[in-house]
Image: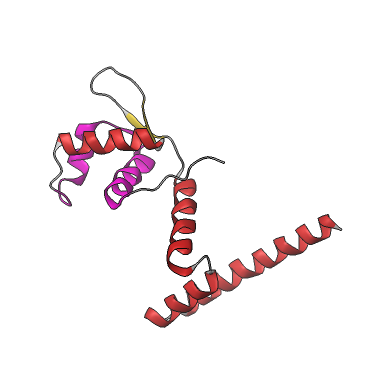
Amino acid sequence: MKDMISLSNGEWKIMKLLWSSDTMTVGQIVKAVENDTAWSKNTVFTMLKRLEEKGAVRMLSTKRPQPYAAAISKEQATLEETGSFLSRVYDGSVGLFVSALSGYRGLSQKEIDELRAILDQAEEENRKREQEQC
């Protein structure tokens, strides 16, 4: 089993840019976040190097300016982060998480309907798995 990739808040910001743009250079990233952060080129370069070491980003060329691209999908990173969060905060319990979320800010009817559809789909998938095992 491969190691899980854990991303900091700043790394998430860079990854979201790469997922939406396919490739970006350090300068393009600095420009894209200049209204939200005070990151210099050195800061962005350091963050990209860390992301590269984690296996989340890859440099596509050594030719300057170097283009960077995401090496993991948004779906993969989101699933790993969600699993890590549920384990750390709710001991892996989705029920406790939904209960806490509902109590914290309440759920709109649209969100309740979305959850119901997700649960219906999960139930159907469980039925299919059980039938395949018989």
Name the residue: 13% across, 39% down. Answer: 40
Q: Seen in the image, is 81 located left or right of residue 94?
A: left
- Quarter that holds the C terminus: bottom right
Of residue 17 and residue 85, the one placed in the foreground of this image is 85
Report the label total. Answer: 0
Q: Where is residue 54 in the image (x, y as percent from the top left)?
A: 38, 37
Q: Seen in the image, is 18 located left or right of residue 125?
A: left
The magenta stretch spans which residues?
8-37
Name the residue: 46% across, 58% down. Answer: 82
Q: From the viewer's perspective, is residue 33 above or below residue 55?
A: below
Q: Position of residue 67 (x, y in %)?
A: 30, 27
Q: From the viewer's perspective, is residue 81 above or below residue 88?
A: above
Of residue 65 and residue 40, the one placed in the foreground of this image is 40
Res 107 visible: no
Snapshot quadrant of residue 65:
top left
Q: Position of residue 68 (x, y in %)?
A: 33, 30
Q: Is residue 44 magenta?
A: no
Q: Predominant secondary structure in magenta? A: helix
Color theme of the render = secondary structure
Q: Is residue 25 magenta?
A: yes
- Quarter that holds the N terminus: top right
* Residue closest to the far right: 134
Name the residue: 39% across, 48% down. Answer: 6
Q: Position of residue 118 (x, y in %)?
A: 59, 66
Name the residue: 49% across, 57% down. Answer: 83
Res 14 visible: yes
